[in-house]
Image (cartoon, rainbow, N blue to C red):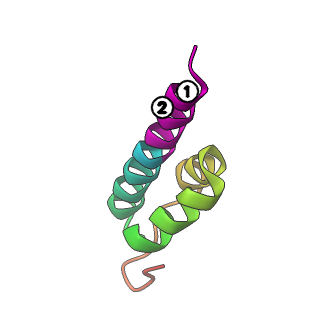
């Protein structure tokens, strides 16, 4: 397998996960941009945090 193809697939997968996390965060009334950036750094750990954290209250948007 070509290393370049594997690396490209990894980057595409990580980027896709970050976009999914941003949408999931917005559905829980949290900032999609902040969680998108966190997801770029933390990846699957950010996914776990989004799923475990309760939705933000109406006045609390982070």
Can residue 31 be seen in this snapshot? Answer: no
Instruction: Say the numbered circle drawn on residue 9.
Output: 2
Quadrant into which the N terminus falls:
top right
Query: Magenta segment range?
Result: 1-14
Callout 1 environment at 10 Å: few (<14), some (14 to 19), or many (20+)? Answer: few
Mark 1 = which residue? 6
Q: Position of residue 30 (x, y in %)?
A: 42, 70
Instruction: Say the numbered circle drawn on residue 32.
Output: none
Residue 57 vertical placement versus 54 (above, below): below
Q: How many marks?
A: 2
Disc 2 element = helix
Whether residue 9 is in magenta: the answer is yes
Q: Position of residue 59 (x, y in %)?
A: 39, 86
Q: Magenta region's main secondary structure?
A: helix
Disc 1 element = helix
Residue 10 vertical placement versus 3 (above, below): below
Residue 44 vertical placement versus 10 (above, below): below
Callout 2 environment at 10 Å: few (<14), some (14 to 19), or many (20+)? Answer: few
Q: Residue at x 44, y 48 (%)?
A: 15
Circles 2 and 1 in contact, beta carbons < 8 Å: yes
Specify the farthest residue to the top: 1
Can residue 9 be seen in this snapshot? Answer: yes
Q: Position of residue 12 (x, y in %)?
A: 43, 40
Q: Residue at x 50, y 27 (%)?
A: 5
45 vs 10, left or right, is right
Whether residue 6 is in magenta: the answer is yes
Nearest the eye: 27 or 39: 39
50 vs 20, left or right, is right
Q: Residue at x 38, y 52 (%)?
A: 19
Q: Residue at x 56, y 20 (%)?
A: 2
Nearest the eye: 58 or 4: 4
Q: Marks 2 and 1, Cα distance to the nearest angstrom?
A: 5 Å
């Amino acid at each position: 397998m070509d290393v370049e193809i594997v690396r490209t697939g990894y980057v595409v997968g990580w980027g896709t996960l970050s976009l999914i996390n941003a949408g999931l965060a917005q559905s829980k009334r949290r900032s999609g941009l902040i969680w998108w950036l966190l997801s770029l750094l933390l990846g699957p750990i950010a996914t776990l945090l989004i799923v475990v954290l309760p939705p933000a209250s109406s006045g609390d948007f982070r």
